[in-house]
Image (tube, rainbow, N blue to C red):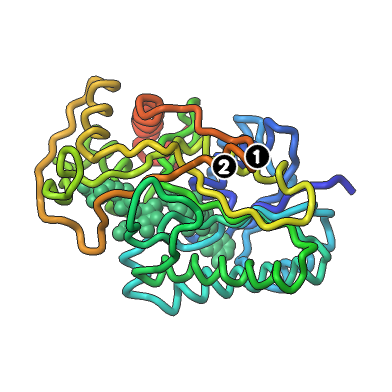
């Protein structure tokens, strides 16, 4: 049996781009996803990009029987665990669903890994574990907290993985704290396809650009930031994908790595909107409205540890993020349902 990687949530936004990066780096992989927030049509796109999985398993990560069968069939050298629910507002309304899916899902996966003696895992954490940071750029040693059930679910999973490593230091664990992934694969074949009204900035901007939405609401222009709008660390999703390949390589021995994946550059909402309009030649109608509840003024990474521990650094700038996001939107007006 050939060594391969299990990708949970591999048909999702970050998972699908990571599949391409893994294929290019010579890894084979199996995707497990219950398609609760993605389309099986992603698999056709992966095939076009020479990144087909060895197998696609339509199953829930909480299904222990399926996991045991899968770990029996394949000799996995490690797991990248993307499967999770990620909408903050929804998590406030449905906390039990979020804890069950994200925390119980991670527990079921870790228990199946333990039964199969697979001890390498890369976990999708988030900058949300820093809450409202006291200062920026944020180092991994900053205090951890949560302000909503989604954030709490990520923190709980991190705690579980830290406790697991305490108990058995043979594990190889990477906690990757993503900042704000945006953009799309340069081919225009893969990208972010949110259901309904997008919560996040870049998908909303691309839908305004395409005429699907009339204008962007900029949530607050009275923050203590250079132009008054919120500042984030936008990161190209292909750079993020490469971060997972780098993490797998760095997990060459028992260790627990905790790493920010961001560019280290703070970009305001206004700057992103202006860059998008300039790069793509499409104006983005916008109006300033009140701050969004729960939002913070600034959040960007100190990415030094990623460079030191993973030998990873973001390569693609804001202009590429905007160009690739727009190419994806223009080529796929119906998302993955757009005929190839
Ligand atoms: P996504 O929703 O596009 O992908 C997640 C995938 O997991 C989906 O394909 C979904 O169908 C699948 N899934 C969810 N629950 C499952 C379950 N119980 N069993 C099997 N499959 C399940 O989201 P994404 O943006 O690709 O995010 C991937 C991971 O990264 C998530 O854990 C998310 O919380 C985390 N993350 C995302 C961001 C972001 O901004 N996108 C930021 C920080 C962290
Ligand atoms: C959101 C989540 C966070 C998650 C992150 C990455 C919330 C409160 N937080 O963070 O937990 O880790 O996504 O997935 O949802 N903005 C607008 N208009 C819009 C949309 C956004 O002005 O229509 C602004 C926001 O106020 C913010 C910036 O754009 O300043 C980025 O917003 P968004 O893309 O939602 O990401 P985060 O708020 O960083």
Q: Which residue is mark 1?
A: 246
Residue 167 location (% of width, % of height): 74, 74
Name the residue at 11% across, 49% down: 222
Residue 136 location (% of width, % of height): 35, 48
Q: Quadrant of residue 312?
A: top right
Q: Nearer the viewer, mark 1 or mark 2?
A: 2
Residue 23 location (% of width, % of height): 69, 35
**Label 1 vs 2, first from the N-terminus:** 1
Q: CA distance from mark 1 to mark 2?
A: 9 Å
- The extreme right residue here reads 1
Could you tell me if residue 275 is visible in this image?
yes
Q: Is residue 67 left or right of residue 101?
A: right
Could you tell me if residue 200 is visible in this image?
no
Q: Quadrant of residue 91?
A: bottom left
Q: Is residue 329 left or right of residue 261?
A: left
Q: Which residue is mark 2?
A: 306
Name the residue at 37% across, 50% down: 194
Above or below, 317 against 251 in this view is: above
Name the residue at 74% across, 53% down: 78
- In the image, the residue with mark 1 has its CB under 8 Å from the nearest atom of ligand 1: no
The answer to whether the residues at label 1 and label 2 have Cβ atoms under 8 Å apart is yes
Q: Which mark is residue 304?
A: none
Q: Quadrant of residue 9?
A: bottom right
């Amino acid at each position: 049996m050939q060594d391969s990687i299990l990708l949970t949530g591999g048909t999702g936004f970050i998972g699908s781009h990571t599949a391409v990066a893994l294929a290019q780096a010579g890894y084979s992989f199996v995707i497990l996803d219950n398609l609760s927030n993605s389309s099986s049509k992603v698999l056709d796109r992966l095939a076009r990009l020479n990144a087909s999985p060895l197998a696609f398993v339509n199953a829930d990560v909480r299904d222990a029987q399926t996991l045991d069968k899968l770990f029996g069939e394949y000799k996995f050298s490690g797991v990248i665990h993307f499967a999770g629910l990620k909408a903050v507002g929804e998590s406030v309304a449905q906390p039990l669903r979020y804890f069950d899916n994200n925390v119980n899902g991670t527990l079921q996966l870790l228990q199946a890994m333990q039964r199969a003696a697979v001890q390498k895992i890369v976990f999708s954490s988030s900058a949300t574990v820093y809450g409202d940071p006291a200062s920026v750029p944020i180092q991994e040693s900053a205090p951890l907290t949560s302000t909503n059930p989604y954030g709490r679910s990520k923190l709980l999973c991190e705690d579980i993985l830290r406790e697991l490593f305490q108990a058995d230091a043979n594990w190889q664990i990477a906690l990757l704290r993503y900042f704000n992934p945006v953009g799309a694969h340069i081919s225009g074949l893969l990208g972010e396809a949110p259901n309904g009204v997008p919560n996040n900035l870049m998908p909303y901007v691309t839908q305004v650009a395409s005429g699907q939405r009339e204008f962007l609401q900029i949530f607050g222009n009275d923050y203590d930031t250079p132009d008054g709008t919120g500042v984030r660390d936008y990161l190209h999703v292909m750079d993020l994908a490469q971060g997972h390949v780098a993490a797998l390589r760095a997990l060459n021995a028992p260790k627990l790595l905790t790493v920010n994946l961001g560019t280290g550059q703070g970009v305001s909402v206004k700057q992103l909107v202006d860059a998008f309009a300039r790069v793509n030649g499409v104006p983005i109608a916008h109006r300033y409205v009140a701050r969004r509840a729960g939002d913070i003024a600034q959040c960007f990474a100190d990415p030094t540890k990623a460079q030191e521990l993973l030998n990873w650094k973001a390569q693609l700038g804001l202009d590429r993020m905007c160009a690739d996001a727009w190419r994806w939107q223009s080529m796929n007006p119906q998302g993955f349902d757009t005929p190839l």
